[in-house]
Amino acid sequence: MKKETIASISTPIGEGGIGVIQVSGQDSLRIVNTVFKGKKLKDLRNAESKRIYYGDICLNGTAIDEVIVNVLRGQDSFTGEDLVEVNCHGGILAVKKTLECMVSAGAKEVHWKELAGRPLSNKKIDLIQEEALLEIPKSKTKLGVKVLLDQYNGALSSFIQETVEQVEKCDNDKKQLCDINNKVKVILATASFGCAITSPQKLIITGKPNAGKSTLINALLKEDRLITHEEPGTTRDAIDEMISIDGIPLTIIDTAGIRETDHEVEKLGVLESKKQLRDADKIIIVFDSSKSAEKEDREIVKFIEELELQKTDKNISILPVLNKADLPGRLDLKIVVGKTFEPMCQVSALNGDGLSTLEENLISEFKEFTKYSPERPIIFTRRQQEYISKALSSSEQCIHSIDENTSNYSNHINNLKQNLLLLLHT
Ligand SMILES: Nc1nc2c(ncn2[C@@H]2O[C@H](COP(=O)(O)OP(=O)(O)OP(=O)(O)O)[C@@H](O)[C@H]2O)c(=O)[nH]1
Ligand SMILES: [Mg+2]
């Protein structure tokens, strides 16, 4: 079936030096040729692949913009079909006008994500690579870009393909199956890191009013972003910011101190804090170590302990922080010491002491990955995690059926192969 030729603005709309419009499909050269007047090349349909040409985009004989077009024939383009990249002036109007010319010449206007779907539909890439392609522009850290580029270039896909080939050859061989099982287990263990790269974990800062929560966030952000004050009850809305520790992005959320209050606005803040806590991946509880323990400290600890008990679907890490370590200590540690609350960190949000240990603790589960070795296959979406988990249980069932000499081995080995293949293709 003949696919429509599509055109999309591929750069963000806004102030900038250039804007890029990509026209992809069988008729892309013909369509752009209708509105492109080359300074040297008279007919774009005769253009060589991987060459750039200078000229004007014209509408009814009038030049709209001065452009450089990059021609990529199907074998050279990322979409796997003829592609013309039109580099026009940036901003809003020049880009929109140039796109309108492409549309008037016969291209269908689409969102850039639809254009990014063409390589998959033309079998130039597989589903994992498409997911990486769509995640790269959203990446929050350099490490994220590195990991996702490797997966776009096929690190995870090759690993899955090799595993599928091994499954096809294993033929009731238990040693081979155990080897496959281990490989699948190892790759599944990369998912928490990969998913933390694409969907940053939520880190909530809680604690009684005036414990130094906002000051601690400013210290982690390394800028005076949030308002801090000696008066308790300063923060009322939950405010979120992005931080990166060794390339791991975290959404850090400042909350109002939790306490009983008659003040209506502060009450709303406390309710919002509790709501945020229920949704957290990680929680820092800030204690003011320069003051003796108060009812509010105990209430927060109790609230979080109850929260932990209610949570069954995911782990939350809880990190207690004894702040204001620069002042003489008065806090009775007994109220904060608990099994789930290790390790404890002493910091001074004001002068920065102890912050590097806190940062290490915050990403300790990802330590193995922050020294990322290039081209390492990584699971980076929940969909991939789901299929690889299913593949793992199928491979365990295969081993079990060999051990027990049961008849359903062929079902399990088929499921194993299917679940691996579903990672690559729908
Ligand atoms: N000496 C000392 N003072 C600190 C430290 N951290 C915070 N403070 C001070 O404690 C006061 C309260 O700090 P905030 O960061 O506003 O406290 P908060 O927990 O956000 O308070 P609320 O928003 O009211 O819940 C401010 O005067 C800070 O300068 C610290 O490590 N040492
Ligand atoms: Mg505050």
Image (cartoon, grey):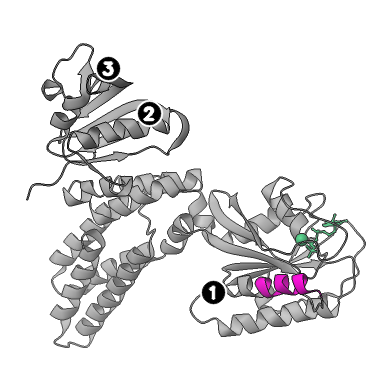
- Would residue 48 appear left or right of 217 to someone viewing this image? left
Q: Look at the image and say whether residue 54 sits in the magenta stretch.
A: no
Say which residue label 3 marks.
54
Nearer to us of marks 3 and 1 is 3
Say which residue label 2 marks.
94
Q: Quadrant of residue 98?
A: top left
Q: Which residues are magenta?
A: 263-273
Mark closer to the chain start, 3 or 2: 3
Q: Nearer the viewer, residue 100 or 216?
A: 100
Mark closer to the chain start, 3 or 1: 3
> Which label sits on residue 76?
none
For label 2, the crowd category at 10 Å Cα-Cα, with few meaning under 14, some 14 to 19 and many 20 or more, is some
| Amino acid of disc 3 | Tyr
Tell me what residue is drawn at x 42 percent, y 28 percent.
90
| Amino acid of disc 1 | Asn
What is the spatial separation of the Cα atoms under label 3 and label 2, in whole angstroms? 16 Å
Q: Is residue 351 visible?
A: yes
Q: Main secondary structure of the magenta part?
A: helix
Tell me what residue is drawn at x 70 percent, y 46 percent.
222
> Which label sits on residue 315?
1
Q: Look at the image and say whether residue 267 sits in the magenta stretch.
A: yes
Instruction: Provide residue 7's location: percent of width, then percent of height.
Output: 25, 39
Q: Are marks 3 and 1 in contact (CB under 8 Å)?
A: no
